[in-house]
Amino acid sequence: MLLAASAGAQSSDPALERVLTQMDKTAAGFQSTQASFAWDQYQKVVDETETQKGKIYFRRAGKEIQMAAEVTSPDPKYVIFDQGKVQLYQPKIDQVTAYGTGKNRAEFESFLVLGFGGGGHDMLKSFDIRYLGNEKVNGVDCAKLDLVPKSQKVRNTFQHIVLWVDPAQGISLQQQLFEPSGDYRLSRYTDIRVNVRIPDSVFKLKTTKKTQFVSSGD
């Protein structure tokens, strides 16, 4: 049923059209976003949920989108995305792991800006979208959207994604990504600030002289 949505059906839904149009307006003026987050990673096999908390930052740099995430609990770690490369720094073991997105860069970036600076109608290029009505998140009446990746390759990673979009700001307050295994990640965002100045230092890893650098893939 999730896969039955078509572009024609999507464009004929006035409620969905309003949400996508508002996201387009936000994307047109997007420069930066920062927020506090709580990431709940659920693993079906062991029926357990691990929660990571911290702050996340997005910034437009020319035609590029930069992202930085600072996980403060349970274990500190830092993630930077810049110029098609992801770097993960784990202070506990003093190691930076670099991941190249390579040919998958466009797909990766579409997920990166999902609900944060990405245009609403741009999502129709990669996803079949259904409007699921409205639902409150932190007291905000959000539009709930279900996204099914058009690419089978992407569906092998995420079967579908649910976004809770604040219509007034055109950004998502909550995201849930479902894997074929039954695992999922629920991302909750609070203290969202749009188009504020973010220091360059946020997008640089604070390593030590003894930090080890390793590479994983291209």
Image (tube, grey):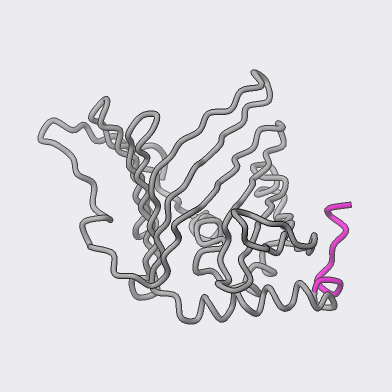
Q: Residue furthest left?
A: 209
**Quadrant of the rendered image containing residue 3:** bottom right
Estimate the x, y position of residue 39 in percent, counting from the top left.
Answer: 51, 40
Judge whether residue 182 is colored magenta. no
Quadrant of the image containing the C terminus: top left
**x 75%, y 63%: residue:** 129
**Quadrant of the rendered image containing residue 119:** bottom right
Q: Residue furthest front?
A: 139
Specify start and end residues of the magenta stretch as a single range: 1-10
Position of 7 compared to 162: left or right?
A: right
Position of 151 compared to 97: left or right?
A: right
- 216 vs 51, nearest the viewer: 51
* Depicted 193 relative to depicted 95: above or below: below
**x 64%, y 18%: residue:** 46
Q: Residue furthest top?
A: 46
* Depicted 38 relative to depicted 83: above or below: above
Position of 193 compared to 150: left or right?
A: left
* Magenta-colored segment: predominant secondary structure: helix
**x 32%, y 34%: residue:** 76
Estimate the x, y position of residue 1 in percent, counting from the top left.
Answer: 89, 52
Estimate the x, y position of residue 147 in percent, counting from the top left.
Answer: 72, 57
Estimate the x, y position of residue 36 in percent, counting from the top left.
Answer: 42, 51
Position of 40 compared to 199: left or right?
A: right
* Depicted 210 relative to depicted 199: above or below: above
**Quadrant of the rendered image containing residue 96:** top left
**x 66%, y 33%: residue:** 183
Judge whether residue 9 is colored magenta. yes
